[in-house]
Structures are given as C-alpha cells and as structure tokens.
Image (cartoon, grey):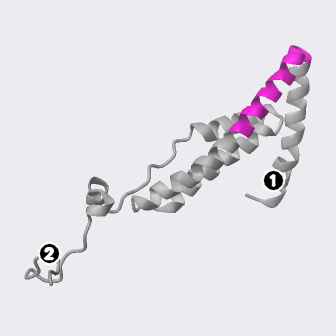
Amino acid sequence: MPLPLLLLILLAFPVVEIWLLIELAARYGVWVLVYLVVVAILGWRLIQDEKLMMLGRMTQTLSQGGAPARALFSGAKNMLAGILLIIPGVVTDAIAVILLLLPSAKPEVFDETVQAEPRQSRRPAAANDDVIEGEYTRED
C-alpha cells in the first residue's frame, strides 16, 4: 500500500467519525450521547475483565502444554476491542464488535495423553524395561 494512500486513510478516519456523530446527533439527539457513554462503560468493563482473565488463560494454556502466543493474541484482541469501544465514534465501535466476533483459537495441546492424565500421575518413562518402580521403608 503506498504511503500517500495510507496517510489519506488515516486523515480521513477522524473526519468520517466526527461527521457521522454530528449526523446521528442531529437525527437522534441526546440518545447518541447516552449510547456513547454506555458503550464507553462497556469498553472499560471489557478491559478490566480481560486484564483479570489474561493471567488465568495464560496459566491454563501453559499447564496444558499449549503455545502462549495464542492466549496472548486472544487477550490483546479483546483489549484492543475495549479500547476501540472507549473511543467515541460509531465506526470504531463497529470495528470493535467485529474484533469481538472473530473466534479466538483454542489452545493447542502437544500430547493428547497429557490432557487426559492428571499432572501428578505422569512419570517419566524408564530407560530400560528392567526397572520395577515401588516404594520402600527402611526398618532398623
């Protein structure tokens, strides 16, 4: 994409947002302000909730042996949607809704047996077949 076209899009975006807000305010009045306040509160709440859930999602992904980049991408996508909801404007809200509707990738598990077994019961395989595992106590 050539640089002048990118600059034109970046400069036109705020103009389109302001023009659309003025048109909607002329048509619907105070309801546009109510809409902007409610959406900003929802965006703030989304950011707060995502901040709390990101650590749990990362821990779960790592404990299952998955790639942490997927959990980070999902969290970053939701945080960006929250920021776009806070910014006043209808176009940014539409982009935020599209981001929220995009499906997040499920965490991958490298080994299916890891998911089926509890973490404490997994033991490393013996180096040879002559080893018999067991417990002992010393009695003197």
**What secondary structure is found at the residue carrying circle 2?**
loop
Is residue 75 covered in magenta? no
Q: In the picture shown, does residue 7 fall above or below 26?
A: below
The answer to whether 136 appears left or right of 103 in the picture is left
Task: Provide residue 99's location: percent of width, then percent of height.
Answer: 63, 41
Residue kind at label 2, given as amino acid type? Glu
Q: Residue at x 46, y 57 (%)?
A: 61
Give the crowd class for mark 2: few <14, some 14-19, many >=20 residues within 10 Å. Answer: few
Quadrant in which residue 2 is drawn = bottom right
- The magenta stretch is 26-45
For the C terminus, which image quadrant?
bottom left
Report the residue marked by disc 1: 5
Sequence-wise, which precedes: disc 2 or disc 1?
1
Residue 127 or 29: which is nearer the viewer?
127
Q: In which image quadrant can residue 98 be found?
A: top right
Q: Amino acid at mark 1?
A: Leu
Residue 23 to residue 66: above or below? above
Of the 4 image quadrants, the one containing the N terminus is bottom right
Residue at (51% x, 61% y) in the render? 68
The outermost residue toward the top is 28
Residue at which label 2 appears: 133
